[in-house]
Image (cartoon, grey):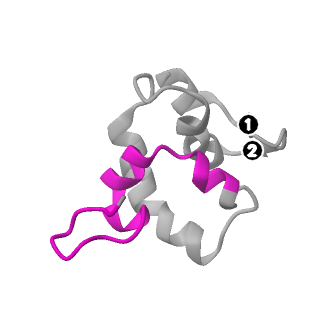
């Protein structure tokens, strides 16, 4: 998967749309492959860095379907507020 992270420049998303560029490919990794195979620390760093910018100025691929496809566990590790409301103690309400 390291090769995909470093070299792949396009991805076909869940709606059969093609997106180009490293950031799009890297952002889509957890939506189409197991988290066991992605460079998790690099992905966490990318999501922590880019998620706020994607929210403020969303790329075309950053839609509700994309966000729903990102594993909950990943979003919680990026920022537990990304998944939903929390209790007063800080844990996520289910």
Left/right of residue 56 with respect to residue 94 in the rendered view:
right
**Residue 83 sits inside the magenta stretch:** yes
How far across and how far down the image is residue 34, in percent?
49, 26
Label 2 close to label 1 by CB (< 8 Å): yes
Residue behind mark 1 = 10
In the drawing, what numbered circle is on residue 20?
A: 2
The residue located at (69%, 53%) in the rendering is 65
- The answer to which of 87 and 2 lies nearer the viewer is 87
* Image coords of residue 66 (percent x, y): 65, 51
Mark 2–mark 1 distance (CA, rounded to whole Å): 4 Å
Residue found at x 34% / y 54%: 76
Q: Does the rendering let one see residue 45?
A: yes
Q: Quadrant of the C terminus?
A: bottom left
Q: Against 85, is 37 above or below?
A: above
| Outermost left residue | 89
Residue 62 visible to an observer of this rendering: no
Rendered location of residue 18, percent (x, y):
82, 41
Give the quadrant of residue 84: bottom left
Side of 16 where 66 appears, left or right: left
- Placement of 92 over or under 33, stated as above or below: below
Q: How many marks?
A: 2
Between 80 and 41, the one lying in front of the other is 80
Query: Magenta span covers which residues?
Result: 65-93
């Amino acid at each position: 998967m390291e090769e995909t992270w470093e070299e792949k420049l396009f991805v076909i998303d869940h709606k059969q749309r093609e997106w180009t560029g490293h950031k799009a490919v890297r952002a889509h990794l957890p939506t189409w492959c197991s988290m066991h195979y992605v460079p998790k620390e690099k992905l966490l760093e990318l999501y922590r860095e880019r998620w706020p910018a994607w929210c403020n100025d969303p790329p075309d691929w950053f839609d509700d379907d994309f966000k729903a496809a990102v594993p909950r566990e990943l979003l919680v590790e990026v920022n537990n507020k990304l998944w939903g409301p929390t209790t007063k103690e800080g844990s996520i309400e289910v």
